[in-house]
Image (spheres, rainbow, N blue to C red):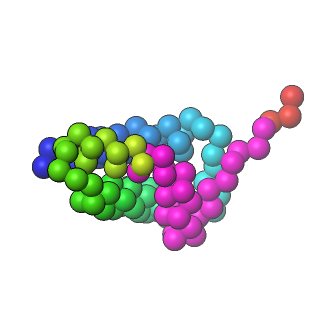
Amino acid sequence: MLEWLIPVSLFWILAAVFLGALPVNLVGGSGLQQILGLLLMYVLYLAVWGVLHRLLGDNLLVRVIVPTVVASLLIPLLAKVAFAIVRVRVERARAAAH
């Protein structure tokens, strides 16, 4: 059961990097909608991880590493889907003119 600790902990770091450090803007919606989008993104991330975790074989290392890598790589897609459900758009930030 401790294997869930890895994706649960890693999600918050990856979400902070994706939504805060990369050139991405959340457009529209209230603060509540954006929080709900983040929580929905978390649920989708854990759902993807859980399905892959169950489908892979008996090797514990494979059952933890592969789902974590795949779910982590899907963060941009999961963000678009989750925020779209609560009517918030995820867009690339435009470069500022110098």
- Say which residue appears at 48% left-offset and 50% top-offset: 75
57 relative position to 94: left or right = left
Image location (x, y in percent) of residue 13 = 40, 38
Q: Quadrant of residue 47?
A: bottom left
84 is higher (above) or lower (below) than 10: below
25 relative position to 67: left or right = right
Q: Nearer the viewer, residue 60 or 18?
A: 60
83 relative position to 35: left or right = right
Image location (x, y in percent) of residue 68 = 35, 45
Q: Residue furthest right?
A: 98
Residue 57 counted in the magenta span: no
Which range is magenta? 71-95
43 relative position to 6: left or right = right
Q: Nearer the viewer, residue 88 or 76?
A: 76
Q: Nearer the viewer, residue 58 or 69?
A: 58
Image location (x, y in percent) of residue 19 = 54, 44
The answer to whether residue 13 of the structure is visible from this angle is: yes
Q: Residue furthest left?
A: 1
- Say which residue appears at 76% left-offset and 44% top-offset: 94
The answer to whether residue 35 of the structure is visible from this angle is: no
- Say which residue appears at 42% left-offset and 48% top-offset: 70
21 is higher (above) or lower (below) than 11: above
Q: Residue furthest top?
A: 98
Residue 74 counted in the magenta span: yes
Image location (x, y in percent) of residue 9 = 30, 41
- Say which residue appears at 51% left-offset and 69% top-offset: 86
Tell me how many marks there are.
0
Quick one: quadrant of the C terminus?
top right
Q: Nearer the viewer, residue 2 or 30?
A: 2
